[in-house]
Image (spheres, helix red, strand yellow):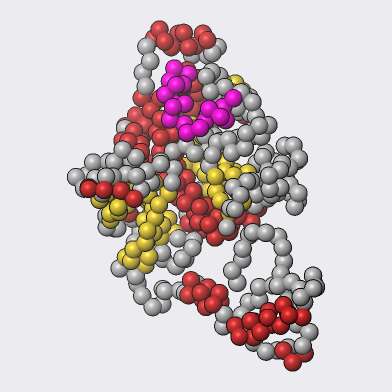
Amino acid sequence: MAQILAPSMQWQVKVSNSSLKGRPMTAKLWNSLVLNQRVKSKNSCKFRVCAVKSENGTVARLEDLLNLDLTPITDKIIAEYIWIGGSGIDVRSKSRTISRPVEHPSELPKWNYDGSSTGQAPGEDSEVILYPQAIFKDPFRGGNNILVICDAYTPAGEPIPTNKRHRAAQIFSDPKVVSEVPWYGIEQEYTLLQSNVKWPLGWPVGGYPGPQGPYYCGAGADKSFGRDISDAHYKACLYAGINISGTNGEVMPGQWEYQVGPSVGIDAADHIWCSRYILERITEQAGVVLSLDPKPIEGDWNGAGCHTNYSTKSMREEGGFEVIKKAILNLSLRHKEHISAYGEGNERRLTGKHETASIDTFSWGVANRGCSIRVGRDTEKQGKGYLEDRRPASNMDPYVVTSLLAETTLLFQPSLEAEALAAKKFALNV
């Protein structure tokens, strides 16, 4: 039976006529009950209505069709082509039939869409071409059906301006980057909003809950809001083949986080984009709005980030801590470039408060969550490991952030003078 995660009011029908017991709840009988109860209960507040599952009702028949297993009937599958729209953060998709199951995106045909309707092409030349790039199992349709992550090109084969995957693929295919096997662990934070008022889930409408403190990783009806959505998303991602590694309630009530990784190279971004699409679909079904705004509520509330953990082969080997410090030095020299690419509205989040560094100042530290770059205690102790870039906003483009980290730490060559100044400024003895 369909469930609606909306108001908590429960509706029930109290049937007092014994002659109705055991009879199927047809539409005619339901209408008769409601009309009779309305007449009898004109001045009564005892009348409550409860949605009743009917085996031959519309909801049951619809779910039967949605859950149909096509495998014994046909080899054909449904492929959901997914791409990023004109805002750079909106996911779009449409479906097509494929004649047989596939295992690799190269087996799928290119497709097209109306770019003028997504803000990606003019009306007089609106055709944009989709190139399949990554495949995931479809947790909504099941069977051999698939989700297909695509990027977008002009009919002449040129990447459109909003296609950030193309540039990322170029960086990740550079021999220097390939040899260093870059690993990523991405922490995607998000906020759930009530659909009718666009206010965080669990918050009183037009009001505020108690101060932050009890909500982070909390349990209980007064602390955790939206756990069913988080759990449904977790399982759906595992089913799809996304490398999701964990989830937890966040500091602000109504806010959640999940982690994807460790993943290598461009796979990390493909997995994040597919996980975002699945989350959009689940919140759609739940009647809840997904927000990736980096500061959804102004004031003394945590923002939403997308902290990106990063390491290279050299960082993970003996002596890796010195390599990490050299990478931090490079990151300090390109701080402005990174900030400009780390998400719209990030200046509202990176204030130096609520576990963030100031957007205008680069900093790093061991176990310091108020820095731009955090290094873990274990990494310092073992002399090797990874760094965490805490600057990316929740609405960042993972293709941009992952490839920019690789480019700055592996391909960028600063001058000796710039290196010396940065090393002195940030106490980096490299």
Foreground pick, 34 / 92: 34
Q: Is there any visible trace of residue 124 in the rendered image?
A: yes
Could you say which quadrant of the image residue 54 lies in? bottom right
Q: Which residues are magenta?
A: 332-351
Residue farthest along the bottom direction in this orientation:
19
Q: Which residue is found at the position 71% from the left and 41% from the top?
A: 208
Q: Position of residue 302 (x, y in %)?
A: 64, 34
Q: Is residue 1 left or right of residue 83?
A: right
Q: Is residue 359 above or below residue 75?
A: above
Using the rendered image of the protein, determine whether residue 392 is visible from the camera's viewpoint: no
Comparing 342 with 46, the one in front is 46
In front: 253, or 32?
A: 32
| Quadrant assignment for the N terminus | bottom right
Residue 113 in percent (x, y) is at 30, 54
Q: Residue at position x 40%, y 41% from top?
A: 88
Furthest-left residue in view? 156
Is 349 contained in the magenta span? yes
Q: Position of residue 278 (x, y in %)?
A: 49, 54
